[in-house]
Amino acid sequence: MSDVITIVQDHWVLLLIGQYPNGPLGGLACTLLLSVLAIVLAFPLGVGVALARLSPWRLLNVPATALVYGARGIPLLMLILWVYFLVPLLIGRNVSGFVTMLCTLVVYESAFLAEIVRGGILALPKGQMEAARALGHSHLGAMVHVILPQALYNTLPSMVSQFISTIKETTLGYVINVHELTFAASQVNNQLLTQPFQVFAILACVYFIVCWSLTQLAEALERRITRKRQGPRAAAHRPDPEPVADPLSPAAATRSTP
């Protein structure tokens, strides 16, 4: 235990921010930055793919379905290597590992977010769309202004869970020299050489704390959404309290007379 404390005291800066400001940002800060950027950039793409998947037009439906099944059916490591070697050939210049990993995660996560959003839309009652169309909305207008806001709100816990998965997936950036948390832990291990178990135990604990905290947030969001959805229904089905008789009313006086 003392070895773990000593390692944290001596190398916490490297594990937290890498070599920044004397080098690239790394460590936990790079992991979180990469994860946040990937989810933020993948979100609009995922919503667009979900709407295309639900579209009756095959010109939109077929490519969106191919993207979802392709991204979800191929290992992420293979996608990373494809992007890493293919993008420089296409644009004619080298791309940093951070940008490569970000582009890969955006495509990969958009496929999963698209299915989350699509599931949220399909879970809504069909009467929502019919009512919106009856009010004069077009199909796209009803989807954007009526259906999509409800679906996105209901899928917030699932999106937080996907963000947690993204944090864990950033560890694969190690193979293309992205200076994220696993890369920083490897640098610490290369300096010490004799304490790999302690170093990677610290790494596991950091990932566990971050992911466990976000899991609690997802569960709290799910409970809040469930209460908000069931609140009006519970109030509507709650039995009315029995009326309390007024002791001064004639009926009460009649009942109390022996």
Image: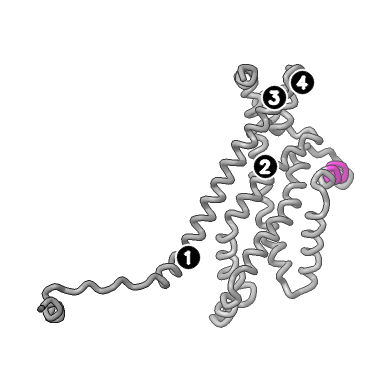
Q: Is residue 85 magenta?
A: yes
Q: Residue 193: x and y, percent?
A: 76, 18
Q: Earlier in the sequence, mark 3 or mark 2?
A: 2
Q: Amino acid at mark 2?
A: Ile
| Residue type at tag 3 | Val
Q: Nearer the viewer, mark 2 or mark 1?
A: 1
> Going from the N terminus, do you reach mark 3 or mark 1 first?
3
Q: Kindly identify the residue that appears in the image at 45 percent across and 69 percent down.
A: 233
Badge 1 density bin: few <14, some 14–19, many ≥20, Cα 10 Å? few
User: Which numbered tag is attached to residue 190?
Assistant: 4
Q: Give the labeled residue for mark 1.
A: 230
Q: Residue at x 62, y 41 (%)?
A: 211
Q: Where's residue 112, x and y in %?
A: 71, 55
For the C terminus, the quadrant is bottom left
Task: State the CA–CA distance, disc 4 to disc 2.
Answer: 24 Å
Disc 2 element = helix
Q: CA distance from mark 1 to mark 4?
A: 54 Å
Q: Which residues are magenta?
A: 81-87
Which residue is at a point 84% across and 45% down the rendered structure image?
78
- At 78% from the left and 37% from the top, the residue drawn is 97
Q: Amino acid at mark 4?
A: Asn
Q: Label 3: which residue?
A: 199
Q: Residues within 10 Å of mark 3 (few under 14, many from 20)?
A: many
| Discs 2, 1 touching: Cβ within 8 Å | no
Using the image, tell me which numbered label, if any, was put on residue 167.
Answer: 2
Instruction: Rate crowding at label 2 as few (under 14), some (14 to 19) or many (20 or more) other CA atoms within 10 Å.
Output: many
| Badge nearest the viewer, 3 or 2 | 3
Disc 3 to disc 2, C-alpha distance:
19 Å
